[in-house]
Amino acid sequence: MSATLLLIFELAGTIAFAISGAMVGLKKRMDLFGIIILGVTTAVGGGVIRDLVLGRTPPATFQDPIYALVAIGSSVAVVFPAVRSQSDKRRVVSDRLMLVMDSVGLGIFTAVGIKAAYTTSDTHNWFLLLFVGVITGIGGGIVRDVLAGNIPEVFARHFYACASLIGAVVCIISWDSFGETLAMFIGSGVCVILRFLAVRYHWQLPRPE
Amino acid sequence: MSATLLLIFELAGTIAFAISGAMVGLKKRMDLFGIIILGVTTAVGGGVIRDLVLGRTPPATFQDPIYALVAIGSSVAVVFPAVRSQSDKRRVVSDRLMLVMDSVGLGIFTAVGIKAAYTTSDTHNWFLLLFVGVITGIGGGIVRDVLAGNIPEVFARHFYACASLIGAVVCIISWDSFGETLAMFIGSGVCVILRFLAVRYHWQLPRPE
Amino acid sequence: MSATLLLIFELAGTIAFAISGAMVGLKKRMDLFGIIILGVTTAVGGGVIRDLVLGRTPPATFQDPIYALVAIGSSVAVVFPAVRSQSDKRRVVSDRLMLVMDSVGLGIFTAVGIKAAYTTSDTHNWFLLLFVGVITGIGGGIVRDVLAGNIPEVFARHFYACASLIGAVVCIISWDSFGETLAMFIGSGVCVILRFLAVRYHWQLPRPE
């Protein structure tokens, strides 16, 4: 049951990340190939960086292509105006739905990253666990922005990365007490809630003068 | 015999890729170090990404430095105006020769990438094979463009990446029936022909509005 | 004794590299998260690339987080104007101190990279040793610049990368004759001296027209 739930969450995140990548490609006037690559990269890029750092080769995304296939499908869908039109209220993927899916994706990817570190590496220090969790959550977006010639969004805007970071901390703290599955849901949940609150109340990190 | 032919093709591709990288460095007003690094990166970067994904460390290019040395030489040559001057019809590397070598490079690198996946990894699913083939073909150019502050050309222009992709598909399909060597030549050939046709007839992928 | 000295040098380099990264983040108007990430990336990025190429996973920086922690502290410190103010002559980190620490960092990181190649990989050809040394020295700065949307400084300015390269050559040549420790200090020393001379006498690589 919880495995199915996890899969649904992961796929929701994959779709949302792929759409965000494909939209950047569209905005940059890329062709269909570029749009698909940017969509897939955003969806699976964080996991690939994670696996390279952990020494899991070939990375998980190449062993189970379901996520990449879903990302390709989502990226192609973005090309059809009906899916993304800003003015059409009946469009398939509304801003609100995107926010929900993107938040769920950020939370679940962070937790999945931490799980990967626990199950792959013998090194379990805090720094590795946190890095691997957060990079799984935000790495795809960073690669997307670098490939599109933008400064990564997470460096300059939003509370985004911090939601992932705090979710990761909560997930790691809960790991020994509550077990893997529960810790992953608790960590993801904290991340999602923080991400919602940050959007709702316009939380921002300080930006030094 | 076919090993020699393969080596000649690989070296032709290495030279063409290195020149294209060094030219970008020149255009961006880099110094000699930057020009050489960009040339070498373009020539061997795709193979390095491939090997990192496949877990082959150190990457092949560090085990057999011949390609990097050829790339360094080609990059240095570009600095001399006689080699690259646009107006001089007798210049050593004409546009036509560059197109031929670059196309051969794209084809042969794609096939070499697929061979690396077959011989290295236990995972042989389509997605991995295609990714590894295409990234070997186009990865160096992507790194070149990111390092030079440009949006990767393959995302926005040309039929380029698709020639590599279709060549990879043909190569993989032929692998079991025709054996490694023949499959590599067939896949490369298809890629080269498509790349020529694309330039000749100005093929472009659709670019959504 | 020499181990302590090495650690002191490495920490000086880590602080200088982190500050240079954090300063770029500040200039690009990033928020606190972006500034810290850019600082840490600059400090440990070269070593991470080195370890990925050598197949050392997880990279050393994740096994011994002291360097990352020092980098985080240095990046946060940069946010306080007293530390970085250009006009205040009594500021904690003067330009001269930065130059010394950055040079020491470049030299010692280059030598540490070569040591990593000797102790990790069975492949000991010149090309791998040089690459691994230089990338440990300049890789963090390259990643910093790419993430900040700049063309990497080392490609266009300064004699910087060449100091690392020549230091690496000297270190490798000395390795068999003088042993690990002495070779590392000799190589680092040459790099530091060249870097100083380059700044003092405005050395530049040729930049082709």
Image (spheres, coloured by chain):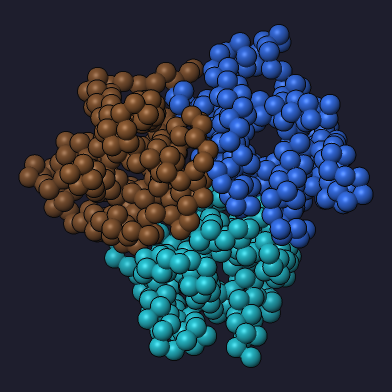
Chain colours: A cyan, B blue, C brown
User: Which quadrant would the N terminus of chain B be assigned to in this image?
Assistant: top right
Image spot of residue A30 (x, y percent): 66, 50
Name the outermost residue toward the right.
B177
Closest to the observer: A82 or C146? C146
User: Which quadrant would the C terminus of chain B be assigned to in this image?
Assistant: bottom right
Name the outermost residue toward the left.
C90
Total labels: the figure holds 0
Classify residue B87 as left or right of residue A80.
Answer: left
Classify residue B205 as left or right of residue B49.
Answer: right
Image spot of residue C152 (x, y percent): 43, 38
Depicted B102 relative to depicted B169: above or below: above
In the image, what residue occupies the spot 46% across and 23% down?
B32
- Image quarter for residue B195? top right
In the image, what residue occupies the spot 59% across and 67% down?
A17
In the image, what residue occupies the spot 49% across and 17% down?
C209
Depicted A174 relative to depicted A206: above or below: below
Closest to the observer: A199 or B73? B73
- Image quarter for residue C171? top left
Depicted A47 relative to depicted C89: above or below: below
- Image quarter for residue B93? top right
Classify residue B31 as left or right of residue C16.
Answer: right
Closest to the observer: C113 or B141? C113
In the image, what residue occupies the spot 40% across and 47% down?
C47
Residue C163 visible in the shown view: no
Image spot of residue B3 (x, y percent): 79, 30
Residue A105 visible in the shown view: yes
Image spot of residue B61 (x, y percent): 60, 36
